[in-house]
Structure formats: C-alpha cells, structure tokens
Image (cartoon, rainbow, N blue to C red):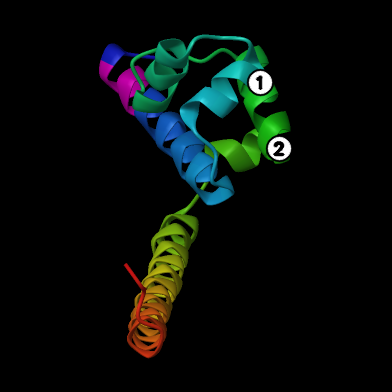
Amino acid sequence: MNDLKQRTANKSVGKSIRILRHQHGWSQEDIASRLGISIPAFSKIETGVTDVNLSRLEQIANIYEVSVVQLLTVDSEQTEAAPSHLNVMQKKLSDREAEIATLQRKVIELYEELRNKNPVAV
C-alpha cells in the first residue's frame, strides 16, 4: 500500500476508534490503560500517526465489544449519533443547572426570612 493510502487508512481507523471511545464516554487514559500502553501512544493510534497491527485492532475491538470489521467500518450514522446524544446531555445539564439556581435562590430567600424574624441579640 502506498504511503498516502496507508496514512488515509490509519486516520480512518483512528477516527472510528475515537468515535467509539466518545460514544462510551471513556477517556484516552481509560483505553490506554486497558491496552497496557501510554496515553501518547494511544493518541497516536487515534490520530492515525501510528500504524495499527491486527493484534492491536483485535484488542481495541474487544474493549468496545465489536468485531474488527465493525471497528474498521464505523459509518457516518454512528458519527452523527454521538453529537446528537451529546446535545441531549448538554440540554439536561443546562436544565439541572437552572433548577439548582432556582433552589439556591429559594434557600437564600428562606435564610433572609428566618434572619429577619429572629434578630440576633448582641
């Protein structure tokens, strides 16, 4: 395989691995430790800098509980699923933050109300 094709293949595999990692909510550190390699070494796999041999692909596929073929053929549907899932989670987080802010205001109001009812004798 010529050099350009190899780099393109490495980047494609790396992108698939990164997509699966994001879908599982795992960090590079999580996967690197499962593979018994350093975080920079795993980062090079994800970015396509490093060639990945079949043995390493099998290890990665086992971590994600997919076949090597599935690992090599993560399609655009899966790439779109992660961002939409992320948007849903961001919306939920935003809603929770608004609830927390409302509850904090209520606590402050109750505290002020109690403080005004029971003046402290100095």
Q: Nearer the viewer, residue 52 or 32?
A: 32
Residue at (59%, 38%) from the top-left corner?
A: 71
How far apart, in angstroms, are the residues tagged by discs 1 and 2?
A: 17 Å
Q: Are marks 1 and 2 in contact (CB under 8 Å)?
A: no
Q: Looking at the image, is mark 1 or mark 2 nearer the viewer?
A: 1
For label 2, the SS is: loop
* Residues rendered magenta in the picture: 4-8
For label 1, the SS is: helix
Q: Return the residue at label 2.
A: 67
Q: Quadrant of residue 120?
A: bottom left
Residue 10 horizontal/vertical position (percent): 40, 23
From this view, report whether residue 49 is shown above or below residue 97.
Answer: above
Q: Return the residue at label 1.
A: 34
Residue 99 horizontal/vertical position (percent): 42, 80
- Where's the N terminus, which quadrant? top left
Dot 1: few (<14), some (14–19), or many (≥20) neighbours within 10 Å?
few
